[in-house]
């Protein structure tokens, strides 16, 4: 499972050097993203490097899980209660319905929230620093961290260690 780490750089040139060091360490190009203040992003960062501004996808995944679990419990409870006469297929349908409703509701809420990295490091972003976000396996990230910190002056690792799918 991929883990996400965040680095702070003072400018775009340092961010580019950090990305190059991460690539040399074995991080795939698709696993490197940049986050910056809106005026810096519009001027300097290509679209394929930008991180999503909202928490939409992680919220939808969490909502599907929680909604599915709630639907499963409701469906199994309905199977146990004899007068309702619900079958196991009905419990499965309740699980799917719960997952869909949970996903939909959580995605609505998540679309209005900034993503977790933007929330946690807003002070860095507003100060004009560019965040380099790297996803990878623990061993690749350890190697990439060492290479990035050794090869780039001004880059620092920020305290963020999360699974890539939920960040």
Image (cartoon, rainbow, N blue to C red):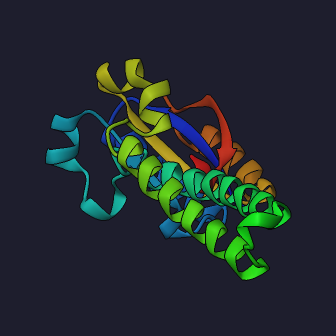
- Tell me what residue is drawn at x 72 percent, y 64 percent: 75
Image location of residue 151, percent across then percent down: 58, 44
Q: Nearer the viewer, residue 43 or 120?
A: 120
**Image quadrant containing the N terminus:** bottom right
Image location of residue 92, percent across then percent down: 70, 75
The answer to whether 114 appears left or right of 120 in the picture is left
Q: Looking at the picture, does residue 72 appear above or below residue 35?
A: below
- Tell me what residue is drawn at x 29 percent, y 25 percent: 128
The answer to whether 88 appears left or right of 33 in the picture is right
Q: Number of labelled discs?
A: 0
- Tell me what residue is drawn at x 32 percent, y 38 percent: 112
The image quadrant of residue 61 is bottom right
The answer to whether 97 appears left or right of 46 in the picture is right
Q: Nearer the viewer, residue 32 or 120?
A: 120
**Residue extending farthest front:** 83
Image location of residue 85, percent across then percent down: 75, 73
**Residue extending farthest bottom:** 89
Q: Nearer the viewer, residue 112 or 141?
A: 112
Q: Looking at the picture, does residue 17 appear above or below residue 98?
A: above
The answer to whether 120 appears left or right of 83 in the picture is left
- Tell me what residue is drawn at x 39 percent, y 48 percent: 34
Q: Looking at the picture, does residue 13 appear above or below residue 32?
A: above
């Amino acid at each position: 499972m991929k883990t996400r780490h965040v680095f702070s750089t003072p400018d775009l040139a340092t961010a580019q050097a950090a990305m190059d060091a991460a690539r040399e360490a074995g991080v795939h190009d698709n696993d490197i993203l940049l986050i910056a203040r809106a005026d810096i992003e519009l001027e300097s960062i290509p679209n394929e490097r930008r991180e999503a501004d909202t928490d939409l996808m992680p919220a939808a995944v969490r909502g599907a899980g929680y909604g599915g679990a709630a639907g499963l419990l409701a469906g199994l409870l309905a199977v146990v209660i004899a007068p309702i006469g619900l079958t196991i297929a009905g419990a499965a349908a309740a699980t799917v319905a719960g997952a869909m409703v949970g996903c939909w509701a959580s995605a609505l809420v998540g679309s209005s929230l900034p993503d977790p990295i933007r929330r946690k490091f807003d002070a860095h972003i507003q100060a004009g620093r560019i965040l380099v976000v790297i996803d990878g396996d623990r061993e690749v990230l350890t190697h990439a961290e060492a290479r990035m910190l050794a090869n780039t002056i001004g880059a620092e690792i920020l305290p963020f260690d999360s699974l890539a799918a939920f960040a």
